[in-house]
Image: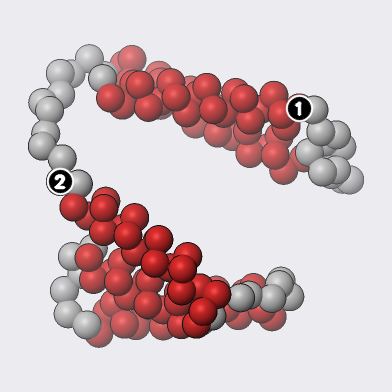
């Protein structure tokens, strides 16, 4: 039941987004305008939401309610909150390194070598992508 309510909520949000995206000029594939990407995003999300609704209707299996463990969710929200706070203070690379390491460790990845390697690789690749390839300054 909760999944259906969330799906309908996202359908409503996406339809609102689609209405605003339609107000922008989209152009065409050869010369896209400012509304092309929002329109493409809204249509893609609408298709995915409709596929989810079809899947929900086709599955008539009763699901057993499970007890949800909200502690990981709360830890992720706390981590993102602190990331926003320390991003301007210590900079992108250090803040992202700390956040990713934190998220990997609360995500039940055992040991320190794999989370550390994934963290360094991810933070470095994102830094190189944005700083050098896209030429966007990071905080």
**How many numbered marks have been drawn onto this rendered protein structure?**
2
Residue 66 or residue 87, whichever sits in front = 87
- Residue 5's place in the image compared with 31, above or below, is above
User: What residue does disc 2 label?
Assistant: 69
Residue 79 or residue 67, whichever sits in front = 79
State the mark number for residue 22. Answer: 1
Q: What is the CA distance from the residue labelled 2 to the residue labelled 1?
A: 40 Å
Is residue 128 shown to the viewer in this render?
yes
Q: Is residue 87 left or right of residue 112?
A: right
- Residue 21's place in the image compared with 90, above or below, is above
Quarter of the image for residue 42 reads: top right
Q: Is residue 4 left or right of residue 16?
A: left
* Mark 1 closeness class: few <14, some 14–19, many ≥20 residues within 10 Å: some
Which colour scheme appears in the figure? secondary structure
User: Residue drawn at (15%, 46%), measured in percent from left and top?
Assistant: 69
Considering only order in the chain, which callout, 1 or 2, is on the residue closer to the N terminus?
Answer: 1
Quarter of the image for residue 1 reads: top left
Q: Is residue 124 left or right of residue 1?
A: right
In the picture, the quarter occupied by the C terminus is: bottom right
Residue 134 position within the rendered picture, expressed as x and y whole percent measured from the top left: 71, 71
Say which element carries label 2: loop
Is residue 29 shown to the viewer in this render?
no
């Amino acid at each position: 039941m909760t999944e259906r309510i969330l799906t309908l909520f996202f359908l409503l949000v996406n339809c609102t987004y689609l209405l605003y995206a339609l107000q922008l000029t989209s152009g065409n594939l050869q010369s896209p305008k400012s509304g092309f990407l929002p329109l493409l995003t809204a249509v893609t999300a609408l298709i995915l939401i409709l596929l989810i609704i079809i899947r929900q209707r086709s599955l008539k299996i009763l699901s057993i309610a499970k007890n949800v463990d909200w502690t990981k969710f709360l830890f992720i929200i706390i981590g993102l909150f602190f990331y926003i706070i320390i991003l301007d203070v210590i900079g992108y690379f250090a803040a992202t390194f700390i956040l990713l390491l934190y998220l990997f460790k609360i995500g039940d990845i055992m040991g320190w070598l794999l989370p550390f390697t994934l963290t360094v690789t991810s933070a470095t690749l994102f830094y190189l992508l944005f700083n050098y390839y896209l030429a966007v300054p990071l905080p």
